Amino acid sequence: MSQLITEELVELDLSADTKDSATRQLAELLVASGRVTDLEGFLSDVAAREAQMPTGLEGGIGIPHCRSEHVTEPSLAFGRAADPVDFGADDGPADLVFLIAAPAGADSDHLSILSSLARSLAVPEFTAALRQVSDPRTAAALIRGDADDLAELVASGGEAGSSASETGASSPAAPPEPSGESAESAAARSALPAQRTSQTADRAAEASGEGKHPSMEEGAQKNAGGPLFRVVAVTSCPTGIAHTYMAAESLERAAEESGGNVEITVETQGSAGFARIDPALIAAADAVIFAHDVEVRERERFAGKPTVDVGVKAAINRPAELVAEARAKAERGEVAVGPGEGAGVPMSQAGGEGDGFGTRLRTWLMTGVSYMVPFVAAGGLLIALSFALGGYEITEAKSVADHFVWTEAHSWAALLNQTGNLAFGFLVPVLAGYIAYGMADRPGLVPGFVGGALAVEIDAGFLGGLVAGLLAGGVVAAIQQVRIPAVLRGIMPVVVIPLVSSVIVGVLMFLVVGKPIAAAQKAMTDWLGGLTGTNAVLLGLLIGLMMCFDLGGPVNKVAYAFATGGIASADPGNGSLMVMAAAMGAGMVPPLGMALATTVRGKLFNHAERENGKAAWVLGASFITEGAIPFAAADPLRVIPASMAGGAVTGALSMTFENTLRAPHGGVFVVPLIGAPLLYLVAVAAGTLVAAAVVVFLKSLRKQPDDVHTTGDERNAGAGNALQSARPSAAGEAGDRATAAAGS
């Protein structure tokens, strides 16, 4: 296996004004070196990964990355930008950009490179050296870990490591792979040597007296001279890569700088799974630190320990403070009340500086909606099937527990209808229960479900469920802050918290907020039922825009939850049924529009998009809006506006035609159950045509290659020629090698 990064993969004068252009420049280096065979295909894969979540990290760092079938071996390209480029980090743009490329299916290689790089980036001296290094060979050596004296390198502006880098660069390939060595072992052997980098950084910090985070130094002074303090920690983030390992590195460095009296063991729960901390270490630990933005797996292992529970960014930014806080809790004997019930989930804490109340509120609401949607789909489709078999009068059938004839279609229709109605009856309680769960973890479930059931009982509906979930989560979070005698801690999660919180939520819902919310729900239902003319069209247009804005994301879910909440009652009004029809029709448009566009103007799309277009016909017809995500990931500025235009047209037309729908899902398969089905199909077709026309028009405006169907050989030749003109010597020769390799 070749070296992960060489001087040919380093650009210290990156000239880019967008993340796409920065990524393209670094990708061209990979093409020129023969490590990427198809520039446009690889960039499409990078863009698809970028669309899932921004890859910017705090501290001016961008790490675009992907697995791609166009990559021949695990590789890393590095660029330093004089004018920082926005990669979506909370603290601003990035001047250090790392492009990570791994072959398709090489999960171990991909994650090994990412995790090792993340740990290195947590070392301030490492990034400082990269900002000062003056030649590509030294930069590549530094990233590989060949530069032994990091302190000297920082002090000299990047020249001290030249001898080491020359040594490292003199051998173009790593040692031969031992017989029987696994791909994962090889990846680990060739990945960035984070531990060595960290040790080198420690020597640099000691030599220079600089680079320590102030909070680390303060914590070290507080802890110096005391008895050995043992800590176990868990770090995790939504993607399970960068922040997970950066937080672990920061905590370990804080322990090292504490004067030798703190011993920490960190469990990184990342994308590649996790290796569990030895139970003996947990038993011997004096305290636990959870630094996480997703639920800690198997949290019950740490029950009964003093616990610091924060977001993952807190561990990166102020690790020594967390260690000091854990020590203080251990000295006070302040322990969690039960498995996972210590301080709630991290989104309810103040650990992440970028997570304001609005962000946390959205997270809580989306937690409830995400758990509610399966009940909507199951119950709604059962009800739709019952209408197809027995007609709308099936709602008047006797209970199948009292009357059921195996050979009668009417009995089966009644069975489906009554089962579906029972599933639908869980919508509001599940919504409320899991909103409370998002706020307060498992203790929030009981009062949340109780509050949701009360919302149904007093006809507060969907709005009542939202409020009940927020109340329940807030009440439980407040109870958890009360200092409880040790003798009562064992019964808190199973007796005291469910009992007290349910009583409080019951009082609030029955006697305080329930009736006003029920009145508001009735007013909204009456308003929907009375919608006609322009008002109905405008609402349909808005629903269509929201359904297509983020293709299954939070905005889409809000619109869908609003629509399904309207039909969840036992006797929904005509207005609610119209909103449901508009929402489903608009949600079908994005994938159908992209499928049509790839059919009529295929040359505007690459091969992968044309293949996705075939599947998008079925996904769109089935009301799976996410079928358009591959197109939006590759070209969001054209695909999303086109989808929104088509969805707005369908939503407005559906309301104009007064289409109604009792089923919350099903796409074309429930068209027979839609009021005025032919006009509904016209509305969907019109939106599909608009979406396809707009995306074709927008894509036609951009400067196209001579032929989008050019082969990988031709693209590589073009990239090689371009690089040759820009860098006549090394880059030109590398481009020729890439072309020859691709041609063979």
Image: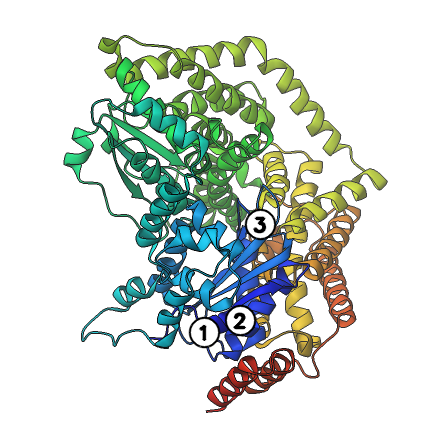
Q: Return the residue at label 2.
A: 42
Asked where in the image residue 233 lies, by quadrant, the reply is: top left
Rendered location of residue 267, percent (x, y): 29, 42
Q: Say above or below: 125 vs 484.
A: below
Q: Return the residue at label 3.
A: 552
Asked where in the image residue 69 lies, by quadrant, the reply is: bottom left
Does label 2 or label 3 sit earlier along the sequence? 2
Q: Return the residue at label 1.
A: 71
272 sits left or right of 512 in the view: left
Query: Residue visible at 22% across and 9% down?
Result: 487
How far separated are the C-alphas under marks 2 and 3?
25 Å
Does label 1 or label 2 sit earlier along the sequence? 2
Does label 3 or label 1 sit earlier along the sequence? 1
593 sits left or right of 161 in the view: right
User: Secondary structure under badge 2?
Assistant: helix
* Amino acid residing under circle 1: Val
Q: Are marks 1 and 2 in contact (CB under 8 Å)?
A: yes
